[in-house]
Image (cartoon, rainbow, N blue to C red):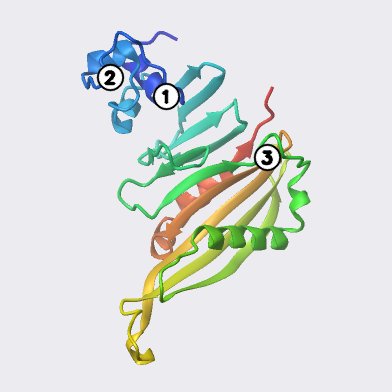
Amino acid sequence: MATTAAAAAAASAFSHGHGRSRRCPPRSRSRATVARCGLLLPVPRRNVLSTMLSTSTILLLGPRQITLAETSGGAFREYIDIFDGYTFLYPKSWIQVRGAGADIFFRDPFVLDENMSVEISSPSSSKYMSVEDLGPPEKAAEKVLKQYLTEFMSTRLGVRRESNVLSAVSKVADDGKLYYEVEVNIKSYASNNELAVMPQDRVQSLEWDRRYLSVLGVENKRLYELRLQTPEQVFMQEEEDIRRVMDSFRVIKTA
């Protein structure tokens, strides 16, 4: 596929590598320098996506190959990571966030509490043969909820969390593999006067109410988890799109 300097810059911006030509000034921000040197940070993701020259772009990043493709409806892009072994759709208006700790992380640029990520178990310690190694879907849901609560544990005084599992189901997708889908709700309450002496002065109020949706799959002896987070009020408005993202998640056999 022929590429222009802009497409080359796009490929560099998506790379997980951090290499840079010694001849390039470390803080240069010009597009010409980006195209010549492959700098990562100066290229906003929106600009990177706008430089894609076709509806399907394959980025060869050393041993890592990632494909971004437009869907026919135009509302989603397909993310394919052949190196790590998974693929999914995501809203094309969402932006990638680096340094979030997940294998990949996308976020709605306008609703900051709405995001998605993929977590993968360590290849050195994983021995998964099937998602059923987690037990039945209900047991897997308890583990997912416990993990979320651990991550959101707060040391603030006067904070209380309410949580419950909304659903836990299994499905066989069109790739013939078994997946678990888990949905949980977590509400956080906090007091704005937690140091008050009298209990009636330490009234807690709702600070956030979110839905967390996970799709769990196993391949390459590793556990893959697609995670989506959205405020409950937003979920009611965007449920169809969120369900489409969940339904699109697939794990892939790697070489």
Give, as a three-letter code, the residue at label 3.
Asp
* 212 w.r.t. 42: above or below: below
Q: Quadrant of the N terminus?
A: top left
Residue closer to the observer: 76 or 134: 134
Residue closer to the observer: 29 or 194: 194
Residue at x-position 74% and y-position 37%: 221
- Count residues near mark 3 (Cα–Cα under 10 Å), then give few for <14, some for 14-19, many for 20+: few
Q: Secondary structure at mark 3?
A: loop
* 227 w.r.t. 40: above or below: below
Residue to which mark 2 is pinned:
26
Give, as a three-letter code, the residue at label 2.
Pro
Q: Nearer the viewer, mark 3 or mark 2?
A: 2
**What is the count of numbered marks?**
3
Q: Secondary structure at mark 2?
A: loop
Residue to which mark 3 is pinned:
174
Does label 1 or label 2 sit earlier along the sequence? Answer: 2
Q: Secondary structure at mark 1?
A: loop
- Disc 3 and disc 2 in contact, CB within 8 angstroms: no
Give how far across and how far down residue 112 sits, in percent.
Answer: 34, 52
- Count residues near mark 1 (Cα–Cα under 10 Å), then give few for <14, some for 14-19, many for 20+: few
Q: CA distance from mark 1 to mark 3?
A: 24 Å
Residue at x-position 57% and y-position 70%: 164
In the drawing, what numbered circle is on residue 55?
A: 1
